[in-house]
Image (cartoon, rainbow, N blue to C red):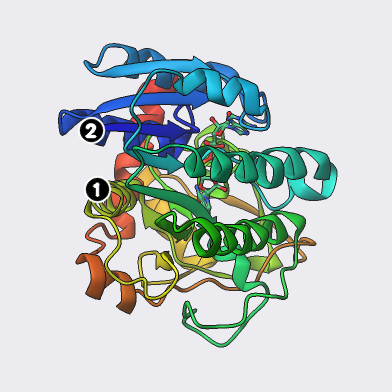
């Protein structure tokens, strides 16, 4: 079994790759190591993966079809976990072209690669809770309307789901889209709030609290996500009907108020935050909350990590990694 993991140097890609390797599978990692956040963190993750048996890595941009074909030349890829993307809601207002390249052209290239890989059994790809836009009727269900995104990032993820459906319809490629809900944990992403809050609280600096803390997020611990992704990609499809494309929410099913989240983090760090209340940011959504009935039923997905446990693990890792 050989799995191609795109975005292998990224947060979710790193952990997913480790889990697949631990099961004795071969993994080809692809990543362009872009500098959206410090490249050293991506290199540090890769250095850990390089020690593992069965791992190979190719630095390539998924928007470059030739480079992508070259990365897998000669390999019998049976599974794909496609996680490479330009992530981040707020940055999509600053640099929309990065999203068009990685998330639109890149995703299309991945579908083309899947189409021409005869040995392929199943491809999972990353979508996002952001496809639900500014909905306030909770929880979010896979059958809800997702045609009113409020950021370009979200629009590209909606487009990925649509392109995937078309490819599954035309070429019968088994595809599964996973709508991740605010994933956090060790080796995480420096652009996300849990990371910058931790950094600032430890340093005694003020944290920016958008919408004055009146937000709801379904924070999902990385190990729970990886357990789901690794299981789904190898199990294959169980829920798809006429067209072999299925989409699932993968979240904690337990949303937290931002204020409560900060209180848990203060507790874990052992220091009070200095808060700067600010209005809602453009592109942001007031709430996320995953209904996980479908993924529970089809794959037995069950999130196990509560926020205090997950944040304790993250903060312990952060303190050790940065020696603070
Ligand atoms: N972390 C979350 O909370 C979350 C939530 C919803 C969706 N997602 C999605 O999950 C996936 C993984 O996210 P993550 O949190 O690990 O982010 P990440 O930024 O840590 O990982 C993405 C990786 O993809 C690589 N990449 C970006 N563009 C590329 C390109 N054109 N070619 C090759 N590699 C490229 C980056 O260098 C990075 O290492 C993304 O598709 C993201 O949109 C994440």
Q: Give 19 or 26, whichever is nearer the viewer.
A: 26
Q: Which mark is residue 182?
A: none
Q: Secondary structure at mark 1?
A: helix
- Say left or right for 246 vs 55: right
Q: Is residue 187 visible?
A: no
Give the Cα distance between marks 1 and 2. Answer: 9 Å
Q: Residue at x 46, y 82 (%)?
A: 139
Q: Residue at x 70, y 54 (%)?
A: 153
- Say left or right for 167 vs 22: right
Q: Determine which residue is flagged by label 1.
A: 234
Q: Secondary structure at mark 2?
A: loop
Determine whether label 1 and label 2 are within 8 Å by CB: yes
Q: Determine which residue is flagged by label 2.
A: 1
Q: Is residue 89 visible?
A: yes
Label 2 CB less than 8 angstroms from ligand 1: no
Q: Residue at x 31, y 78 (%)?
A: 293
| Residue 171 placement (x, y as % from top left) | 50, 56
Near mark 2 (Cα within 10 A), the count class, few <14, some 14-19 or many ≥20, is few
Residue 237: name its quadrant. bottom left
| Residue 279 placement (x, y as % from top left) | 77, 65
| Residue 92 placement (x, y as % from top left) | 76, 48
Examine the rendered structure and indicate whether residue 213 appears above or below residue 88. Answer: below
């Amino acid at each position: 079994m050989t799995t191609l993991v795109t975005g292998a140097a990224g947060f979710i890609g790193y952990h997913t790759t480790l889990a697949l390797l631990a099961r004795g599978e071969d993994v080809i990692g692809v990543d362009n190591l872009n500098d959206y956040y410090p490249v050293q963190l991506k290199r540090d993750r890769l250095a850990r993966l390089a020690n593992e048996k069965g791992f190979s890595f190719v630095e390539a941009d998924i928007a470059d079809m030739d480079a992508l074909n070259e990365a897998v030349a000669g390999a019998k890829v049976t599974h794909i976990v496609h996680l490479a993307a330009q992530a981040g809601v707020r940055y999509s207002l600053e640099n929309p072209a990065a999203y068009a390249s990685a998330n639109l052209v890149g995703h299309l290239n991945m579908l083309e690669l899947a189409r021409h890989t005869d040995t392929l059994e199943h491809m999972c790809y990353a979508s996002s809770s952001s496809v639900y836009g500014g909905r306030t009727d909770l929880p979010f269900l896979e059958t809800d309307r997702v045609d009113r995104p409020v950021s370009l990032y979200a629009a590209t993820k909606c487009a990925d789901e649509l392109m995937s459906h078309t490819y599954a319809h035309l070429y019968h490629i088994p595809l599964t889209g996973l709508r991740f809900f605010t994933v956090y944990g060790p080796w995480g992403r420096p652009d996300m709030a849990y990371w910058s809050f931790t950094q600032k609280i430890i340093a005694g600096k003020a944290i920016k609290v958008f919408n004055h803390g009146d937000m709801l997020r379904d924070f999902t611990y990385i190990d729970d996500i990886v357990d789901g992704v690794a299981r789904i990609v190898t199990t294959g499809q169980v829920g798809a009907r006429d067209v072999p494309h299925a989409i699932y929410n993968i979240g904690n099913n337990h949303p937290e108020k931002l204020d409560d989240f900060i209180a848990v983090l203060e507790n874990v760090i052992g220091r009070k935050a200095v808060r700067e209340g600010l209005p809602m940011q453009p592109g942001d959504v007031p709430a996320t909350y995953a209904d996980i009935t479908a993924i529970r039923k089809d794959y037995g997905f069950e999130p196990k990590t509560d926020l205090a446990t997950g944040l304790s693990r993250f903060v312990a890792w952060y303190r050790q990694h940065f020696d603070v």
